[in-house]
Image (cartoon, helix red, strand yellow):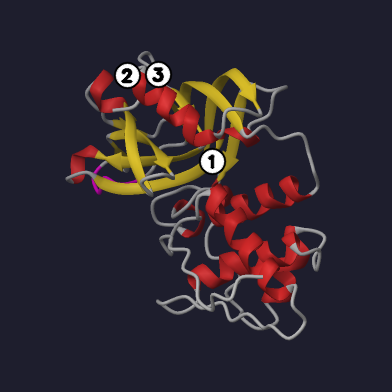
Amino acid sequence: VSTQSTWGFPFDENYPPAFADLVDFCGVVAAHLAEPSHVAVIHCRLGTPQALAALPSLLIYMGNAASYFEAEAYVMQYSAQGVLNPSQQRYIQYLESWVRNDPIPTTRVVQFTYVTIHTTPNFDMFDHGCSPYFTIEQYHSRGGRLQRTYSSSAEAPPRHYANRTKITFRIQSDGTACGDCRFMFFDSQNTDDYMFCFWLHTSFLQVDSTMLALTKSEIDKAWKDTQHFAPEFAVTVGYEIISSKFEPAEDEMVDVLIESGKWF
């Protein structure tokens, strides 16, 4: 067991940690606690947000909780907040699936094909519409950074929509992705107002499907915003799986994407 007494696993309080970092965190703490005399104190520098995402993950990893819901119920005995946003909840459920030994590849390369917004976000005071565009960012764990790999505004200038039941963006250029991805949505009419976002990991996209559907309760920022988003608000993401492998490691596949010009 390591004699080191302090470890840092930084991630933004509003977002989940990269999945590999989440697994590393759980492994380090579990190894430390393997010594009966050891204790672990998990602390967020800003208060509680990151700790509330980390603790349920650790409980699942160590077998002290059978599911995300059981782990969150335990944590909420001590903090009424619970896990703070949907993407953090999604990543804890990813870990739950991984701990169950579900067949999850270390590398899954996908091609995103379209994004559909269901109902129009209300960011215009006059017609209750918006001029949306979105970006896709991928997390490069070697550098610990997000890198933008796609922007819908580069394919076509944002258009204004009002009172539409759905808005669909076709991804015509390269939407190849691997690993942790963040989809960020903005309203270009109001100096690029941030509207909402969500994170996903390509290894957990289903093989027997070509679409990921997220309800309002599963989308960061939108889930608790009743001013700008209707209760029926939702997002669907189309994708095609290019390859699913257990090797090379994810970082190596990111290098492949960089070398092929698909990472910029």
Q: Residue at x 32, y 35 (%)?
A: 148
| Residue lying at the far top of the rendered structure | 172
**Disc 1, SS:** strand
> Comparing marks 2 and 1, which lies closer to the viewer?
2
Mark 2 or mark 3, which is nearer the start of the sequence? 3
Q: Is residue 64 magenta?
A: no
For residue 171, which numbered disc appears in the image? Answer: 3
**Disc 2, SS:** loop
Q: Is residue 232 left or right of residue 194?
A: right
Q: Is residue 149 above or below residue 113?
A: below
Depth order, front residue of 16/235 = 16
Q: Residue at x 41, y 28 (%)?
A: 255
Distance from the alpha carbon under mark 2 to that under mark 1: 22 Å
Q: Is residue 20 left or right of residue 70?
A: left
Q: Position of residue 202 (x, y in %)?
A: 57, 33
Q: Are the residues at dot 2 and dot 1 in contact (C-beta closer than 8 Å)?
A: no
Question: The disc labelled 1 sits on which kind of residue?
Answer: Leu
Residue at mark 1 = 200
Depth order, front residue of 127/138 = 138
Q: Which residues are magenta?
A: 122-126
| Residue lying at the far left of the rendered structure | 191
- Name the image quarter holding the C terminus: top left
Q: Residue at x 54, y 47 (%)?
A: 216
Residue at mark 2 = 261
The image quadrant that residue 74 belongs to is bottom right
Question: The disc labelled 3 sits on which kind of residue?
Answer: Ile
Mark 3 or mark 1, which is nearer the start of the sequence? 3
Q: Position of residue 189 (x, y in %)?
A: 20, 39
> Comparing marks 3 and 2, which lies closer to the viewer?
2
Q: Position of residue 244 (x, y in %)?
A: 64, 23
Mark 1 or mark 2, which is nearer the start of the sequence? 1
The image quadrant that residue 102 belongs to is top right
